[in-house]
Amino acid sequence: MASPSPPRILLSGDVNGRLSALFKRFLSVNKSAGPFDALLCVGQFFPDSTELLEEFMEYIEERRDIPIPTYFIGDFGVAAPKVLSASVKDPANLGFKMDGFRVCNNLFWLKGSGNFTLFGLSVAYLSGRQSPSGQQFGTYSQDDVDALRALADEPGVVDLFLTNEWPSGVTNRTSAGDIPPGLSDSLGSDSTIAELVAEIKPRYHIAGSKTVFYAREPYTNIDAVHVTRFFGLAPVGNKEKQKFMHAISPTPASTMTVAEISTKPPNTTLSPYTIVDDTPRKETTKRPGDSTLDEQYWRYDVKKQKQGNGNAEKLCFKYLSCGSCPRGDDCRFRHDEDAREQYMRGVCFDFLNKGKCERGPECQFKHDLVAEGESIANRRSRSHMASTNRSKECWFCLSSPNVESHLIISVGGNLYCALAKGPLVDDHVLLIPVEHSPSTLSLPPDCQRDLNRYQSSLRKYCKTQRKELIFFELISKRGTHANLQAVPIPQTKASSAKSIFNLAAKKLGFDFETIKGDNDSEARELLKAKFEGASGFFYVELHDGTILGHTIDENENFPVQFGREVMAGLLKMPDRADWRNCKLSKDEEVIKVEDFKSQFKNFDPSEDV
């Protein structure tokens, strides 16, 4: 049986509202070289003046047809806030982030940052531009950046990475004759994107926001066998006749053999985002845009401060945020316990890494390394204690100083119940083991019994509200603290939950396995048996006791927020699929917790402890 043909994808630079010119060019290319499956647009998508607004709105209002599924990330320009505000409220959006937010027929907005599957291709994106303004649309946040950094720690290879601006330094280590004349690295370039692409290591990186077309020579990546190809696309209809549309037909990495994905063209260069130090055959990631004469690279470096070492490596974000790094001793970035402790205490990552933060007053993190007068000896002592007591660094461990105790609703002998951060709906809670555990499926028997009691009590409470509970958990090899999500839904929607989860699974290319026991305890024992030995696992417990489970393969790109996104679709709340859209102030969280406590009091199993 012949393997399916690779998807055919068209790429476009800044549209600037010129949809007629964009689709005219598409129809010409599609006729001569098609058919194509999708069109991905980078750079500014909306008009840059009111002159093109009428033409643009004809497509948005569906008075003119969009001939191909079109995805965009440049959510800025004239009318962007108005159009996008209406989009997030549109009930036609199912809330599946991997599909984007539907703006109109065949037009989808990729909001914030994320990773989704398109015709088998893993597509990551960073929407908007870097800006300290904090406006709702058109800019990306530190949360968006951190989400992509976490993506770099997940298994699998990203096929396409979409950004609006170029990465700083992308022309390093390439033939001067291949660089477009007059190209400036400063205008329309972003050093944060350079850092991200060096970590994510996509096979293709596509960007806009400059006036030229540039197809860089492929380059190698540290700790990866595949090469990356960069395409910078010119604006649609530019006067210089620079190429603004480009076609690719990549085979999804998930279907390629090691030999296929390891192939390197003869013109492959070293990564433009690394420098070679004095150690033979060793490369370290360099912050793009910094001078090679600047040995400090504005890095926070405990060793440098203590020993004067000017050649220390850049901090590893995965180690700072997770406490571990999958690359271990092979990681080219530094695993520094002192820096991790500072990070866990709320110190800004950029401040730790570069010695300064460019976000200014918009940054919500601390810009002081230690309390005034604290000695290095004390810091070392605290760092040692942190490394020997993991619970003190975890946001969910009750013994941790980082736990947000005002979110706690009930504490049992082995388990506690807390309001979810950025709850999807009212009464959206988490069931969390008191002791650090990587999953609720690996809990000891007494803790499992407490979990069953809490689940039963929450179900009874929800029935008094004419609601049913859906439980789901994502178990990752990263070993974060277990938390079982509990989301109440109207009883009228409960019967649809199974079908919508199965539909979402098919969109990602897998089928759930159905697990059902004679009772809750037996069902979870069967579930535990399915999970044992797996690199990752996702399951959802439906209102009727049915459990849908999926083993996540080592190289599978599984969305971290899959369960929430499906629930948002079920509830017709696409704008709440991302928890960051649902953030509450601490005062609001306290009120919600107290309301829940008062209503849950008669069902709370901790009252019997």
Image (tube, rainbow, N blue to C red):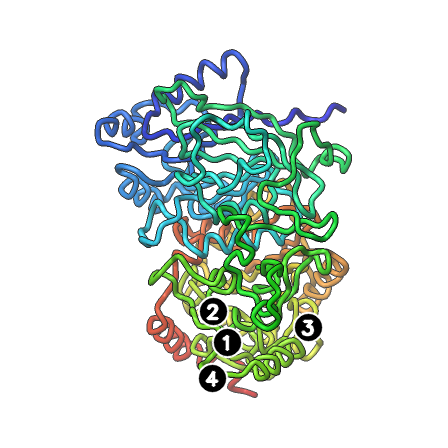
Look at label 2 and name its amino acid: Val
The image shows residue 294 at horizontal and vertical percentages of: 53, 53
In the rendered structure, which disc, 4 or 2, sits on the residue that comes first in sequence? 2
**Is residue 434 shown above or below 64?**
below
The reply, left or right, for residue 565 in relation to residue 511 is left
Depth order, front residue of 500/344: 344
User: What residue would you read off at disc 4?
Assistant: 373
Residue 481 showing in the rendered view: no
The reply to whether dot 2 and dot 1 touch (C-beta < 8 Å) is no
Q: Amino acid at mark 1?
A: Val
Q: Amino acid at mark 3?
A: Leu
The residue that label 1 is drawn on is 403
Label whose residue precedes the other's in the sequence (3 or 4): 4
The crowd level at tag 1 (other Cα within 10 Å; few <14, some 14-19, many 20+) is some
Q: Which residue is mark 2?
A: 347
Above or below, 386 relative to 157: below
- Quadrant (top left, top right, bottom left, bottom right) of the C terminus: bottom right
Mark in the foreground, 3 or 1: 1
Residue at screen point 25% across, 27% down: 52
Question: Is the Cβ of the residue at disc 4 closer than 8 Å to that at disc 1?
Answer: no
- Residue occupying the point 34% across, 54% down: 132
- Judged from the image, the secondary structure of the residue bearing numbered disc 1 is loop
For the residues labelled 4 and 2, the Cα–Cα distance comes to 17 Å
CB-based contact (under 8 Å), mark 3 and mark 2? no
Q: CA distance from mark 2 to mark 1?
A: 16 Å
